[in-house]
Amino acid sequence: MRVLDLGGTPQFWRTAPQRPDHVTVVNISPDLAAAEQWIELVVADACSFAMKGYDLVVSYSLLEHVVSAARRLELADVIHAAADR
């Protein structure tokens, strides 16, 4: 399974009970690090991230930081374009 995690951290996936084949973590923080080959870290704005081909999109700690309705719509577009789930 290929997972896109918007706003998450590599640490979350290191301790998750299930490990996907590949996780792309998108976060604006340049202070995060991922040495694992199965975790890809992208420093970017999740509301404007444009990639497709994921099996699942996860965003467990991002929505409360997206304050305007326009930005929430941008985030929804990213999520819908990235995966069916």
Image (cartoon, rainbow, N blue to C red):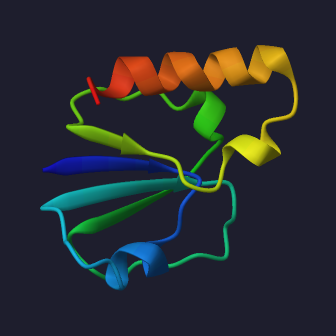
The residue most toward the right is 68
Q: Position of residue 15 (x, y in %)?
A: 36, 85
Q: Is residue 59 left or right of residue 52?
A: right
Q: Position of residue 34 (x, y in %)?
A: 41, 78
The residue most toward the front is 17
Q: Position of residue 18 (x, y in %)?
A: 20, 72
Residue at 52 percent of width and 69 percent of height: 9
Toward which corner of the image does residue 57 lie, by quadrant?
top left
**37 lies above or below 15:** above
Q: Is residue 68 left or right of residue 52?
A: right
**9 lies above or below 50:** below
Toward which corner of the image does residue 30 lie, by quadrant?
bottom right
**26 lies above or below 36:** above
Residue at 78 percent of width and 46 percent of height: 64
Q: Quadrant of the C terminus?
A: top left
Residue at 25 percent of width and 79 percent of height: 17
**43 lies above or below 13:** above
Q: Position of residue 44 (x, y in %)?
A: 61, 46
